[in-house]
Image (cartoon, rainbow, N blue to C red):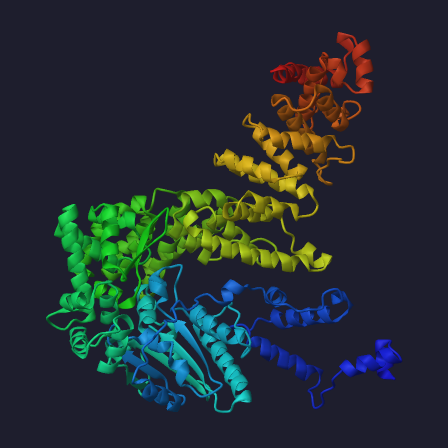
Amino acid sequence: EKLERFTGFSGPELTAFCKLLRLEGNQGGLWDQQNLLTREVGGYLPGMDVDAPVQLKELVTKKACSAGADDPTITKMDVLRALKTDESRLFPAPCLIKEFENVVPREQEPEIFQEIVKAGSIPVIVHAASGVGKSVFATRIKLGLPAGSFTVLYDCFGNGQYRSASGYRHRHKDALVQIANELAAEGLCHPLIPSPYADPSAYVKAFVHRLRQSIASLRSKNPQALLCIIIDAADNAQMAAEEIGESRSFVRDLIREQLPDGVRLVALCRTHRQEYLDPPSNTLRLELKPFSRNETAAYLRQIFVGASEQDIEEYHRLTSQNPRVQAMALSRKATLSEILRSLGPDPTTVEDTIENLLEGSIAKLRDEAVIERNQIDRICAGLAVLRPLIPLSVLSSMSRVEEAAIKSFAFDLGRPLLITGEAIEAIQFFDEPAETWFREKFKPAAGELAAFLENLKPLAANSAYVASVLPQLMLEAGQFDELVELALDSKALPGTSPIEKRDIELQRLQFALKASLRAKRYADAAKLALKAGGESAGDERQGRLLQGNSDLAAVFLESGRILELVSRRMFGSDWVGSRHAYEAALLSGRKELLGEASSRLRMALEWIRNWSRLPEEERQQEQVSEEDIFALAWAFFNIHGAEACTHDLRGWRPREISFRVGRILASRFIDHGRCHDLDELALAAGNDLCLILAITLELRDIHKTPPKSVVERALRLALNPHIKLKDGSRWDSEENTIRAVTALVEAAHKLSVGTNDELITLLIRYLPPSPPRGLSSRFGSLRFPLLRAYALKAVLSGQSLSLIDLAHDELRKELEGSRPHSESQEVREFKENIGALLPWHLLWAKT
């Protein structure tokens, strides 16, 4: 009876409802359930976000009741919106380690796999010398775990970008969030939502909570299952942290944490860097050894099937059993005899291989480009000291070697170095052994580093990259006083762009402030904090400026600076996910960043689709502005072309949005001198009359018109009696309409499109029946567009236009019978204002 009363159902409907209803007993009361929800959401966010439980409850409530009847499904975007985050923040550092085909199974694998399984809660370090194959081995650990187990491989190296400000991988908010959400993506635990209010310890606690959830999920299906967290290049994470003045990476905290039963933590690093991880004394340390002879034979015969036992023996000896040396030797695409000859007569290590390649490249450069040894040394020192991605122009300037010669040098080395970018080419290391060898071989000592800095500082005036790396290098060189002076006096800042100058100055102040606090130089810290406070306020204003002019920022900022700005997530407006629209617009301005821009645009569209499904009341709370739509349209054009851009604009309602956003779009194209692109946009507009009028209106300011075919189509549409132009309900709707119609008539007349009668008819249709009273007012906005329209109509009709023709009915009577000594103030103002302007408008119309 209660169910019947509560639901309002009876008979078959009530029966059907009861079949879908499942009642579970032994549940807590209301307050117990509310406390449980609060604790569970506390696991979602690092630190307690008191608003999250309410938001999730409200989401479920809305979808379950009549308000969600049209769309009761709770989607990923709905949850992200409720928790105020987005997908890119959930996966900040994806694994870039490739799964190799035809991998040679290691003879040690069964033994090491067994040790990992038996390790219990003790952390495991798998260590090896350079090039022995730690990363490849890391991808194979999953093969040796019990049935039902799951592994997550976290990549601390990231193809060499771990030292880049836009690609950090050592921080807790990057590594732990990435690993936890890879587990969540498999349905093993709740997502870990990053929070700006959480410290490293909060992230560790939240991460361990996800591990408990994950292992419980796995063992609910298979009691023997394990969860294995694999950290590749763990030593690089700590090195990256120390390089920027941070004492602890996530690895140091995680390796000392008491992990839940069934969880295995495996960190891989170089043998001589194990102490970088600061492991506890009970850590299980396992060495991965070089190739055995059988492993060498299997690898060599993948390329040279007919290799003899003698060839294998010689190859095994000359490569020092090192897999990377063998891979680099085989990558030369030579015959087996040539490879053996190049390796011999003594065994070769990874260092020997790189050194041999380097020496060969140097010899070639000397022969072909007559480059001196000290120039080569400067190139190598730059590669060893500077963080990725290093612009080729910087290496060229500091070494006084042509960029083409440096590119040739990099290509000669092959795998260790990678050239990236198009408009601004940069160089980075592709693998860790090569980077380590360069840093150990060529990184200047503290005394020499000072001289290196002196050669580098003059380049800061023309390079944002150099200006940004100076503080870190000065700290390494022990130049603390000089660093503080540099930050306080705003020295060695780039003069290329005020935007870059402010951005780098703020970063420099923050870096120097942290260094001062660590060194307990409190007086210097106080000075730096005061200046940093002022610059931070300016940084917020700069952020708004960049967001409003993302098209110009893409022109004046280097690609590296753009990526750093995007990584800081500083843009956005009222709706959740809006930052992706502005990031897409900014990135799309550089050809070399179009891939990143496309990804951001895709995410922005996902959020827009989710927003469009919200109830009207909620959409009003998260309004999408014309500037937001412009950012999307600008990105669409730069990435996908004019057709995609116009298609996106036509999808917005009301249709007048095409006119308003189209004006912004057209004006930006004109500012950039992209008139050809604007013509393409007009041609792609099809029957979108609002967009064509917007383009025509903006082009009139520079005395240009759209293509003739576009004007013909627009005039045909505008003359259609069923089409009534109006810019919505805006206060300036009438002004915009008459401006747009006048611009179209003017363009049609210039291009000899349509008859004069058709053009006059169109003007009459949108001109007021009689001149308005406020025509002569200095404060009205209609005076200029109306005078232009009246003058154009008069000239097209071959009629004269006098002052009295522009007066409203009452004023006309007063003008016809007025006497000079008794004129009213309105008459005097009309004669002074309209009488002075009318001849100029008529002159314009006649020309």
On screen, residue 763 above or below 260: above
Front-most of 313 and 433?
313
Front-most of 714 and 829?
714
Q: Quadrant of residue 386?
A: bottom left
On screen, residue 643 above or below 692: below
Q: Position of residue 456 (x, y in %)?
A: 24, 50
In this view, the residue farthest toward the left is 345
Q: What residue appears at the point 63 percent right and 30 percent down from the top-left corner? A: 711
Q: What residue appears at the point 89 percent right and 80 percent down from the top-left corner? A: 11
Please state, as top left, top right, bottom left or bottom right, where the C terminus lies in the image: top right
Please state, as top left, top right, bottom left or bottom right, where the N terminus lies in the image: bottom right
On screen, residue 315 above or below 783: below
Front-most of 602 and 684?
684
In this view, the residue farthest toward the front is 306
Left or right position of 589 against 655 = left
Left or right position of 604 against 296 = right
Q: Quadrant of residue 349?
A: bottom left
Q: What residue appears at the point 43 percent right and 82 percent down from the top-left corner? A: 228
- Residue 181 appears in the figure: yes
Q: Position of residue 606 (x, y in %)?
A: 59, 59
Tally of numbered tags: 0
Q: Position of residue 653 (x, y in %)?
A: 69, 47
